[in-house]
Image (tube, rainbow, N blue to C red):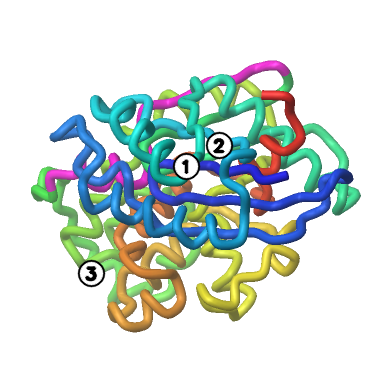
């Protein structure tokens, strides 16, 4: 069976057998949410990338029998029906737009399967940060929040509307104290000189404040993360690059709050050549934005990276 997840940033597909064991998996960077907030349209560039991906898939898979769904960007776009009609005629694939709650439930199904394979037990919250939305789930609670790594990055106006604070005298007298600082915003002031990057970092706190309130009420101490940002960071921590991505090696990896800050700086300062090699093309600025969103969300929670999600859950459901 074949499950296809057409998201706001990527198209991911997986072939599984009757026991829900992976046979083959695919990922393509689409960028469907790019400029969506301004145009209300999935761009021609993104449509062409979708077709290129489906053309590759069609050579190996029967797309007529695929369970194919689309999420946030396609819920918002005005040209979704037109696109899907064209894809149906050209490739035989029948995409369905699913609502946020259905998306969250199916994604959690895939994540729970991965946790079982890792023999990881306990009470978890589940957070899926995509290109245009972010879903948070725990127990029987599911909620979608209207921000994602692409939509958030494009929302930043990059004006210097944050306060300027000078700590030159303190840093001169106590050069190592900055590494012991727990206050996140103070750390941003001290360690980030790039004004554009500092703008992204500060604006992330406003973007996630509603989700953060809900997460705090959940009292969850362990959070499962399964989207492109955490899997990319886990890949870097494992010393791998985009082409050598291996879900088996990153599944179960732990990320902490300071990892998001550290990797935001590392990714932002990568050359375009290195970023394309380690992260995949066109992902650098969006992954940086995602790092700061997570940095703003999490405090003492332990974040566990899981590759599985919506596409695997699709194969396991009767949708």
Question: Position of 15 compared to 10: left or right?
Answer: right
Which residue is identified by label 3? 169
For the residue pair 151 and 309, the one nearer the viewer reads as 309
The Cα atoms of the two marked residues, 1 and 3, are separated by 52 Å
The residue beneath circle 2 is 68
Q: Quadrant of the C terminus?
A: top right
Please tell me in which quadrant of the rendered image residue 131 appears.
top left
Are dots 1 and 3 in contact, CB under 8 Å? no
Tell me where residue 130 appears, x and y as whole percent.
45, 42
Front residue of 22/293: it is: 22
In this rendering, the label closer to the viewer, 2 or 3: 2
Q: Where does the image place residue 203, in percent across and percent down from the top left? A: 27, 42
Earlier residue among tags 1 and 2: 1
Q: Is residue 185 above or below residue 276?
A: above
Q: In the displayed structure, does residue 186 sit left or right of residue 262?
A: left
Q: Earlier in the sequence, mark 2 or mark 3?
A: 2
Element marked by disc 3: helix
Circle 1/circle 2 CB separation < 8 Å: yes
* CA neighbours of label 2 inside 10 A, class few (<14), some (14 to 19), many (20+): many
In the foreground, 39 or 293: 39
Disc 1 versus disc 2: nearer the observer:
2
Say whether residue 229 is magenta: no
**Element marked by disc 1:** strand
Taking the image as shown, residue 7 lies to the left or right of residue 247, namely: left
Q: Is residue 213 above or below residue 281?
A: above
Residue on which the image places disc 1: 6
Read off the magenta span: 140-157
Mark pair 1, 2: CA separation: 7 Å
> Helix, strand or loop at disc 2?
strand
Residue lying furthest top: 140
In this rendering, which labeled residue sits more in front, label 1 or label 3? 1
């Amino acid at each position: 069976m074949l499950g296809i997840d057409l998201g706001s940033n990527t198209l991911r597909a997986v072939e599984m057998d009757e026991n829900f064991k992976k046979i083959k998996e695919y990922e393509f960077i689409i960028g469907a949410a790019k400029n969506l907030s301004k145009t209300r349209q999935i761009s021609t560039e993104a449509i062409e990338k979708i077709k290129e991906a489906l053309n590759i898939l069609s050579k190996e898979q029967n797309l007529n029998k695929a369970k194919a769904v689309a999420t946030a960007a396609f819920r918002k776009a005005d040209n979704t029906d037109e696109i899907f009609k064209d894809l149906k005629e050209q490739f035989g694939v029948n995409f369905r737009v699913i609502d946020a709650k259905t998306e969250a439930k199916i994604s959690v199904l895939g994540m729970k399967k991965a946790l079982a394979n890792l023999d990881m037990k306990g009470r978890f919250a589940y957070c899926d940060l995509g290109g245009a939305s972010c879903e948070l789930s725990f127990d029987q609670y599911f909620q979608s929040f209207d921000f994602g790594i692409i939509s958030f990055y494009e929302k930043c106006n990059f004006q210097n509307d944050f306060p300027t604070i000078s700590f030159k005298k303190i840093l001169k007298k106590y050069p190592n104290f900055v590494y012991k600082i727990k206050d996140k915003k103070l750390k941003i002031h001290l360690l980030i000189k790039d004004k554009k990057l500092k703008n992204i970092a500060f604006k992330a706190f406003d973007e996630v404040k509603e989700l953060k309130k809900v997460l705090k009420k959940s009292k969850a101490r362990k959070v499962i993360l399964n989207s492109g940002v955490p899997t990319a960071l886990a890949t870097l921590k494992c010393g791998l690059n985009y082409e050598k991505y291996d879900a088996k090696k990153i599944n179960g990896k732990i990320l902490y709050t300071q990892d998001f800050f550290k990797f935001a700086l590392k990714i932002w300062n990568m050359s375009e050549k290195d970023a394309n090699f380690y992260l995949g093309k066109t992902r650098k600025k969006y992954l940086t934005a995602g790092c700061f969103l997570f940095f703003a969300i999490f405090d003492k929670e332990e974040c566990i990276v899981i590759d599985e999600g919506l596409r695997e859950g699709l194969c396991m459901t009767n949708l």
